[in-house]
Amino acid sequence: MNSFTDIVEEIKSIISPEFAPKKVFDKDVAEVLGISQMNFATMKKRNKIPFTELLDFCAQRSISINWMLYGQSPESLVEATNNYMIKYYTDINASAGGGADNEMESIEELKIPQQFVCMLGGERELKNIEAINVSGDSMEPTFSYNDIVFINRSKKDLNRAGIFTIRTEAGLFIKRIQKRMDGMIDVISDNSVYPTQILNPNEVEVIGRVVSRFGDID
């Protein structure tokens, strides 16, 4: 996958005619993406790609997100992007901090490059995969605000420890889940600042297992 700097340089090339004869700077890219200069600088330092804003930018300009992320020519993407699509709930945020959820569900089709399909479990699993957004910092460094995560709704067995999207009375969460010997479950935040919660399985609705984001999960 291209780095944050690679993507910024590509965006500069795309928008340069709009700024000619002036040179395009990082602050111009931040403004085009709708990101504050402070957040932009932080993302650049952490090599943290702003997926949601990048998706909006590509959609507005009819640019393939896969070309932007993977540096492939549009011609090489035709077959892969036409064949592999999943549902992306753009208005739903699963919190890696406090609870989050939205009643309005805006659905888009997200094009998946061929090399990413195996990371989601293979072509047969795509019918079970949905994408949502992350908010909050309790799962850092595994996930951060604005990451897009991929959930397999057919995988809900908590006997196998892993990262799941769950719903409780407090809202929708992405957490690391472990089954306890006494039947209760540990709801764990990867960020050590947040304490582990112990819940009764009856208090938790399992939406599905988080199988990937734009990158591998530890």
Image (tube, rainbow, N blue to C red):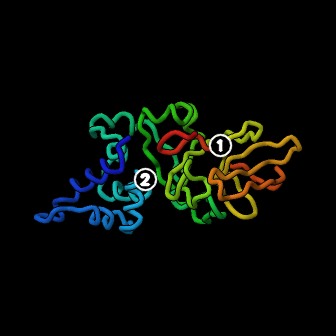
Q: Crowding at label 1, few (<14), some or many (≥20) Cα neighbours within 10 Å?
A: many
Amino acid marked by disc 2: Arg
Q: What residue is disc 1 on?
A: 209
Q: Nearer the viewer, residue 39 or 55?
A: 39
Depth check, front residue: 191 or 85: 191
Kindly identify the residue that appears in the image at 32 percent across and 43 percent down: 67
Circle 1: residue type: Arg
Quarter of the figure with residue 37: bottom left
Report how many numbered discs are placed on residues in the image. Answer: 2
Give the label on residue 46, or none: 2
Residue 122 versus residue 46 in the image, above or below: above
Circle 2 packing at 10 Å, graded few (<14), some (14-19), many (20+), is few
Image spot of residue 195 (x, y percent): 72, 57
Mark pair 1, 2: CA separation: 26 Å
Relative image position of residue 153 (x, y in whole percent)? 65, 43
Counting from the top left corner in percent of width and height, residue 57 is at: 34, 58
Secondary structure beneath label 1: strand
Q: Earlier in the sequence, mark 1 or mark 2?
A: 2
In front: label 1 or label 2? 2
Q: Which residue of the protein is positioned furthest toward the front in this rendering?
A: 193
What is the residue that sits farthest to the right in this orientation?
182
**Residue 93: which quarter of the image?**
bottom right
Q: Which mark is drawn over residue 161?
A: none
Q: SS at mark 2? A: helix
Specify the quadrant that holds the N terminus.
top left
Give coordinates of residue 111: x percent, y percent.
43, 44
- Taking 37 as reference, is 109 left or right? right
> Looking at the image, which residue is at 32% across and 67% down?
31
